[in-house]
Structure formats: C-alpha cells, structure tokens
Image (spheres, rainbow, N blue to C red):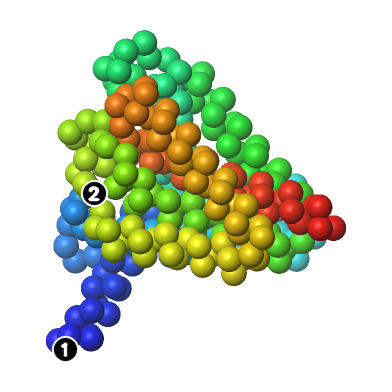
Amino acid sequence: MTMPGAWLGGLAADLKISILFCTRLPLVHSEPIEGRDLARASWALPVAGALIGALAALVYWIAHLAGLPSLPAAALALASTLAATGCLHEDGLADTTDGFGGGKSRERKLEIMRDSRIGTFGSCALMLSLMLRWSALASLADPLPVTVALIAAHASARATLPAFMRLVPQARGDGLSAAAGQPPLESAAAAAALGLIALGFGLGPVPAIIALLLLSSGAGVVAWLSVRQIGGQTGDVLGALEQVGEALVMLTAAALIRIGG
C-alpha cells in the first residue's frame, strides 16, 4: 500500500473505531479494539457524533412530515440517539452523579460508580438531561434548526473528550479511561478543530462563540468536581461531560433562535 493509501486507510480505521465505540451500528472490524486504538482514534469522535445527530435529525424530519407536532417529534429524535448509542453517555452521567452525590469518601464514590444499579441522584440527573434536550429541540420546532442543533451538539460535545482526557488526571488505574490513556496531542487538537467547525457552520459565528464559552465552562466545572470528588476522571465522567456539552449546545441554539425570532 502506498503512503497516501496507508494514511487514508488509517483515517478510515480510526473513523470506524470511533463509530463502533459511540454507537451500536453493525460495522465489522477485523481486529480487537484496544484502549490505545481508541485514544488514537479519538480525533474522529466528533465525526461519529455528527453521524448520530444526523440520524436523529432524519427521525425528526420523518416525524414532522408525518404531521407530528414538535413535542413528540423531538422525543422520537432523542429516542433514536439513545437507541443508536446504547445510552452510553447517559449511563456515565447516571453513574457519576450517583457516585458524587451518594459517596462519603473517594473510595466509596468510585465503588458506587462501578455499581450497575441506578440511584436517586442518577435518576434525577438523567431526567434533567433528557428534559433539557427534549424541550430545547421541541422549542426549535422547524426541522432545519433542529437538524443544525442536533449535529452541532453531538459533534462538539464529543470533541471535548480527548482534550479533557489529556488535561485531567485519571482517577484510577483501571477502567475505560485508564485503558485508553492520554490521546495523542494531534488527536485532541483535530477533535477540537472538528468541534469548532461543527459549531461555526451549524450555529453561525456569534452563537458558536457563546456555545464554545459554555462548553469550556462546563468542562471546567466537570473537571473541578471530578478532581475534588474522586481525584480525576474516569470513563463515567467522560460520559457525564458529553451529556453536559450536548445539553449546553442545544440550549444555546434554542435560546438564540427564539430571541432571533
């Protein structure tokens, strides 16, 4: 294989790994995916996010064409993302909030986060996340801004994960985040650039800047809480971060379009 061919083949493999990680789409990968593979491929997480957002937008368009009002159409679009991802990030949000809210010590918090059962804190966090995203999409109403918001939110929220993994220490020596390790600097930079492109083209310059500030602030708060509560980040914390970012971008789109209208 020529050098350009090998480079393109590597990009395609990274994209496939990111899609396999983020979704339950039936793609075939010839080799087992290890943590270092996911770290390298993390640049493509925003692309996988954009694919998930586009799928949800398609569901919304179909519901809209079928005559459904924006409220059930938004619920169906949101449900399609849950089905496509297997509630990957929602699970992380629930585990993180259960651990942070229910544990008295660092060790107990980490133990709760490993527990597959969901508690009061996790249930409330999930309901809040779902309600915020559902109501934001429903308030946009028209399929075009809904499409923009979905793709921008899913892409940019996942774009924050590689940089977060590089900047925030790991809370424990095992688990998904520990297995992946620190993504390469070029992967984190590429993911951030793709996230900025998704925000800029999707929301426009001013809304994109506002969304970027909110994403940065949200990541900073999650980082501070994680270090304070458990000494760093885990795979569950990364899931919680994605959920926070997704909601912030959708709310930004909803607020600015409502003001503009």
Q: Which residue is mark 2?
A: 182
As drawn, 231 above or below 188: above
Q: Can residue 115 be seen at all in this image of the molecule? A: no
As drawn, 118 above or below 156: above
> How far across and down, in percent of the image, does residue 136 sit?
69, 47
What's the amino acid at mark 2? Gln
Q: Quadrant of the C terminus?
A: bottom right
Cα distance in 3D space between marks 2 and 1: 29 Å
> How far across and down, in percent of the image, does residue 6 sit?
19, 81
Q: Can residue 134 be seen at all in this image of the molecule? A: yes
Q: Which residue is mark 1?
A: 2
Give 142 or 62, whichever is nearer the viewer: 142
As drawn, 13 above or below 224: below
State which quadrant residue 33 falls in.
bottom left
> How far across and down, in percent of the image, does residue 92 sit?
41, 36
2 vs 1, front mark: 2
State which quadrant residue 43 falls in.
bottom left
Give 193 or 72, whichever is nearer the viewer: 193
- How crowded pointer 1 is (Cα within 10 Å; few <14, some 14-19, many 20+) is rated as few
Q: Quadrant of the N terminus?
A: bottom left
Q: Residue at x 41, y 21 (%)?
A: 100
Q: Residue at x 56, y 49 (%)?
A: 213
Count of numbered marks = 2
Asked if marks 2 and 1 touch (Cβ < 8 Å), the reply is no
The first of marks 2 and 1 along the sequence is: 1
Disc 1 secondary structure class: loop
Disc 2 secondary structure class: loop
In the picture, the disc for residue 124 is none
| Residue furthest out toward the top | 104
Q: Residue at x 32, y 13 (%)?
A: 105
Q: In the image, is 105 to the left or to the right of 206?
A: left
Q: In the image, is 66 to the left or to the right of 126?
A: right
